[in-house]
Image (tube, grey):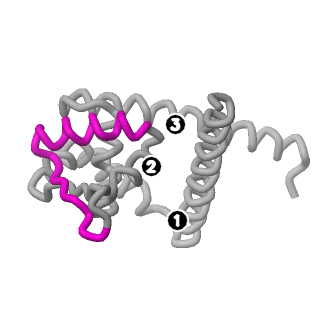
């Protein structure tokens, strides 16, 4: 059984590795966005839409942590660039449903292909239990990020009131 100092050291190493992973992920996202002639927010929006098929402008604003005004400008720009289609929600004409154009998805995936192949090879060596541990870990981290984003939004709302 590991002692407390070994555990504390392991946790510190994990926290450091997590911060470095996050930093490199952001640098990578910026490089991909630049290569595609997009902003990182544009790329995050398109990535989100690739996962969910379609969303409202409000959902995109919530997911990207952008104001609705910023999302409206971004969606207009992405639609003019041919990445998106938008249509009024038949159930609520005030809402806009945004969908990524399927023919543009390969272009967006191309810069990630080599990295995805390398990740696939990395994961091949993991046991199912290890993969499931990572899935649980990332799921919990996502929930924490979303909770913190909500908290930050709430603070912004109460400070501006």
Closer to us: 25 or 43 = 43
- Does label 3 or label 1 sit earlier along the sequence? 3
Q: Nearer the viewer, mark 2 or mark 1?
A: 2
Q: Is residue 81 above or below residue 132?
A: above
Which residue is rendered at x = 58% and y = 71% of the image?
A: 129
Q: Disc 3 designates what residue?
A: 22
Q: Secondary structure at mark 1?
A: helix
Asked if the residue under mark 1 is in contact with the one under mark 2, i.e. CB atoms within 8 Å, the reply is no
- Does label 2 or label 1 sit earlier along the sequence? 2
Which residue is rendered at x = 17% and y = 50% of the image?
A: 84
Q: Identify the magenta region.
A: 67-91
- Tell me the tag on residue 63: 2
Within 10 angstroms of label 3, few (less than 14), some, or many (20 or more) residues?
A: few
Q: CA distance from mark 3 to mark 1?
A: 19 Å
Residue 102 image position (x, y, % from top left) = 14, 59
Closer to us: 49 or 130 = 49
Within the magenta stretch, is there residue 71? yes
Residue 134 image position (x, y, % from top left) = 56, 60
Within the magenta stretch, is there residue 62? no
Q: Disc 1 designates what residue?
A: 131
């Amino acid at each position: 059984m590991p002692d407390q100092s070994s555990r504390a050291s392991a946790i510190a190493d994990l926290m450091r590795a997590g911060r470095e992973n996050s930093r490199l992920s952001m640098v990578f996202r910026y490089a991909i966005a630049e290569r595609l002639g997009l902003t990182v927010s544009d790329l995050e929006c398109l990535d989100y839409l690739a996962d969910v098929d379609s969303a409202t402008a409000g959902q995109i604003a919530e997911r990207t942590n952008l104001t609705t005004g910023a999302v409206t400008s971004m969606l207009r720009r992405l639609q003019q660039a041919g990445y998106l289609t938008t249509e009024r929600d038949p159930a609520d004409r005030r809402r806009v449903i945004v969908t990524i154009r399927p023919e543009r998805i390969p272009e967006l995936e191309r810069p990630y292909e080599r990295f995805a192949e390398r990740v696939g090879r990395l994961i091949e060596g993991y046991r199912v239990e290890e993969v499931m541990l990572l899935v649980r870990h990332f799921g919990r981290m996502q929930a924490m990020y979303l909770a913190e984003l909500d908290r930050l939004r709430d603070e912004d709302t109460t400070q501006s009131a």
